[in-house]
Image (tube, rainbow, N blue to C red):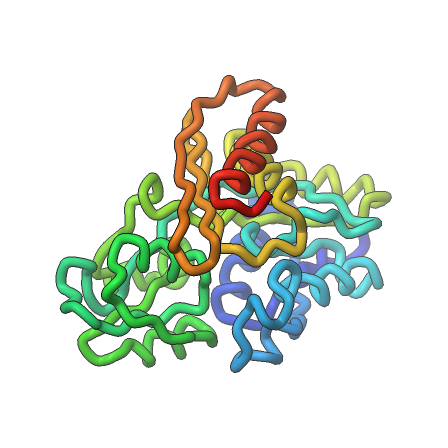
Amino acid sequence: MKGPLRIATRRSEQARTQAQAVGDQITERTGTKTELVLVETGGDRNRDVPIHVIGGQGVFVKEVQHAVLDSRADIAVHSAKDLPTEPMPGLTIGAFCARRDPADALVGAALGELAPGSTVATGSVRRRAQLGWHRPDLHFIELRGNIATRLERIPPDGAIVMAVAALEILGLTDRIAQRLDPSEYVPAVGQGSVAVEHRSDDTDVATTVATLDHEVTRRAIEVERAFLAELGSGCTLPLGAFVDGAVFHTFLSDGDAQVVDQRKTVLALTPDDLDTARSVARLATQAIGRR
């Protein structure tokens, strides 16, 4: 390869930091130098609009992917939870990096410290449904923006919900009031991991990216993504899926948290787990009365 390997990523501090970490790993493992190519996405441009209104899957990745397809960059680095299950033609997910803590966290106050009627700010329909199921007295408001902005908008005597991994990346775990157990508050598909895409026909870059792939994380996220794919790319219902060893935790709600399906499924740790995930998705949709 002539020149540095170009890494496409979003402009946010979290995205830049995790992309730079990927670049540092590539340099350490292969000796290849890297540089960042910063891209603004549709999700970044529409910060005042709820994610599920903008379009859900893909709003934070499409422009980054096109930077690679257009040869402005060699690889794309995404938070794995933002990556649609429908593959982008011409691109391959060459690596899922080792997963950080997949859990969500409350910042501002722990759940037991929130008085009845307290305000919790989050832009995630999943987080609202899960917290509302456990604490129907809570009042939820929309929250978008980068991490610094969200930390500035903690409601008085209330809390916001954030991914532990995002706080870890920026060295802000001291702001956590309570880590939410991911077996009870099931995280988003892929949460805590970084996905790396490259052009499918670029074998040299594929070899480089493969040095980043973490087998245990890949197996887990592929099962989670099979669950999500079975629900359909247009699904906007509150849902979560998380593989912890041989246990598959899933959550699906009707949207108002009036009907919730949350279950644990034991996996065989074989390729058949993908079929198991699809079956769990079908059972979950039947349980909440959607099929």
Left or right relative to 155: residue 162: right
- Determine which quarter of the picture holds residue 2: bottom right
The picture places residue 243, in percent across and down from the top left corner, at 46, 34
Near-viewer residue (254 or 235): 254
Near-viewer residue (211 or 134): 134
Residue drawn at x 27%, y 61% is: 136
Left or right relative to 274: residue 254: left
Left or right relative to 161: residue 97: right
Residue drawn at x 64%, y 43% is: 229
Whether residue 62 is visible, yes or no, is yes
The picture places residue 236, in percent across and down from the top left corner, at 57, 58
The picture places residue 14, in percent across and down from the top left corner, at 48, 65
Left or right relative to 82: residue 125: left
In the picture, which quadrant includes the C terminus?
A: top right
In this view, 205 is above or below 178? above
In this view, 20 is above or below 227? below
Whether residue 101 is visible, yes or no, is no
Q: How many marks?
A: 0
Near-viewer residue (211 or 110): 110
Near-viewer residue (263 or 100): 263
Residue drawn at x 78%, y 63% is: 66
Residue drawn at x 40%, y 40% is: 262
